[in-house]
Image (cartoon, rainbow, N blue to C red):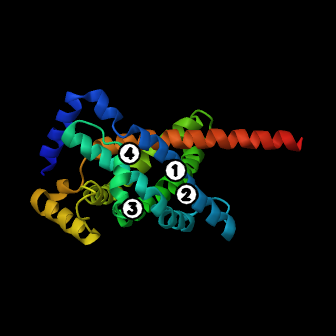
């Protein structure tokens, strides 16, 4: 399907039932945010602790991306199955039905798309968890030292710089995930080479637009998500530091 046709179809679904479309896959998304964070941060901080790093570096990000992918992938597949089902039927597919279909194949469908997810997670961890805080420190040093610019503003600036890079890097990987995870669980799986071939066919027909879809929305989402995530991280870090300082005194 051409990018314009896909966009028109998505807009038509949203205009028909905007609330249902917005809330489709909400529960696995909410649960998934928690489930995805635990293994990713567990491996990220665990690696840093074992090797004696202060702040997590790129090696820790690589370890977290590879090791956490098998835990994260089932959640992402359920989300995409629900969205694909809603797109064709206008109804949300129950999570238990997805799990029952997967159980019939020994739950192996839940791990479709794990390879591109590893790359996606690596880009996310490298740029979002490691790169953004370092960039924020640099921005704080360069333009925030006078105190005229708050930490929240430097956080937003750093997120705005990192997000376009993140979207450009991850969009092809996200496209591969969509190809591999949205086909029917009851049917045969789409292998990673087959997904690459399909993406190559899209590029041959539609150019770079066949791969880089939804860039604008992706960048806006990344800026908001990354900024709010680090605001929460900084807030909790400061609270823990204040608590520990009070205990020492």
Q: CA distance from mark 1 to mark 2?
A: 7 Å
Q: Are marks 1 and 2 in contact (CB under 8 Å)?
A: yes
Q: Which residue is mark 4?
A: 95
Q: Which residue is mark 2?
A: 39
- Which percent across, then down, holds residue 216? 29, 42
Q: Which residue is mark 3?
A: 107
What residue is rendered at 30% in x and 38% in y?
92
- Which percent across, then down, holds residue 191? 27, 69
Q: CA distance from mark 1 to mark 4?
A: 15 Å
Please tell me the numbered disc located at residue 70: none
Please tell me the numbered disc located at residue 35: 1
Helix or strand or loop: what does disc 1 sit on? helix
**Label 3 environment density (alpha carbons within 10 Å; few <14, some 14–19, many ≥20):** some
Q: CA distance from mark 1 to mark 3?
A: 18 Å
Label 2 vs label 3, nearer the camera: 3
Q: Earlier in the sequence, mark 2 or mark 3?
A: 2
Helix or strand or loop: what does disc 2 sit on? helix
Q: CA distance from mark 4 to mark 3?
A: 13 Å
Q: Quadrant of residue 102?
A: bottom left
What residue is rendered at 13% in x and 45% in y?
4
Helix or strand or loop: what does disc 3 sit on? loop
194 to the left or right of 168? left
Can I make out residue 132 in this image? no
- Which percent across, then down, holds residue 147? 62, 35
């Amino acid at each position: 399907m051409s990018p314009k046709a896909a966009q028109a179809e998505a807009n038509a679904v949203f205009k028909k039932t905007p609330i249902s479309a917005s809330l489709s896959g909400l529960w696995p998304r909410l649960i998934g945010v928690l489930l995805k964070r635990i293994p990713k941060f567990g491996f990220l901080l665990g690696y840093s602790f074992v090797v004696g790093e202060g702040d997590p570096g790129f090696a820790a990000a690589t370890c977290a991306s590879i090791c956490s992918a098998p835990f994260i992938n089932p959640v992402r597949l359920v989300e995409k199955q629900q969205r694909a089902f809603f797109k064709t039927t206008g109804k949300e597919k129950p999570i238990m039905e997805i799990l029952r279909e997967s159980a019939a194949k020994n739950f192996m469908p839940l791990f479709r798309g794990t390879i591109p997810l590893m790359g996606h997670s690596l880009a996310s961890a490298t740029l979002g968890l490691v790169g953004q805080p370092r960039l924020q420190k640099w921005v704080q040093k360069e333009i925030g030292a006078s105190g005229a610019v708050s930490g929240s503003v430097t956080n937003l600036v750093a997120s705005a710089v990192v997000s376009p890079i993140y979207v450009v890097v991850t969009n092809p990987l996200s496209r591969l995930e969509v190809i591999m995870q949205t086909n029917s669980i009851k049917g045969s799986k789409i292998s990673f080479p087959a997904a690459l071939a399909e993406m190559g066919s899209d590029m041959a027909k539609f150019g770079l637009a066949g791969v880089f879809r939804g860039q604008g929305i992706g960048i806006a989402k990344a800026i908001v998500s990354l900024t709010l995530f680090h605001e929460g991280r900084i807030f909790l870090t400061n609270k823990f530091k204040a608590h520990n300082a009070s205990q020492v005194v």
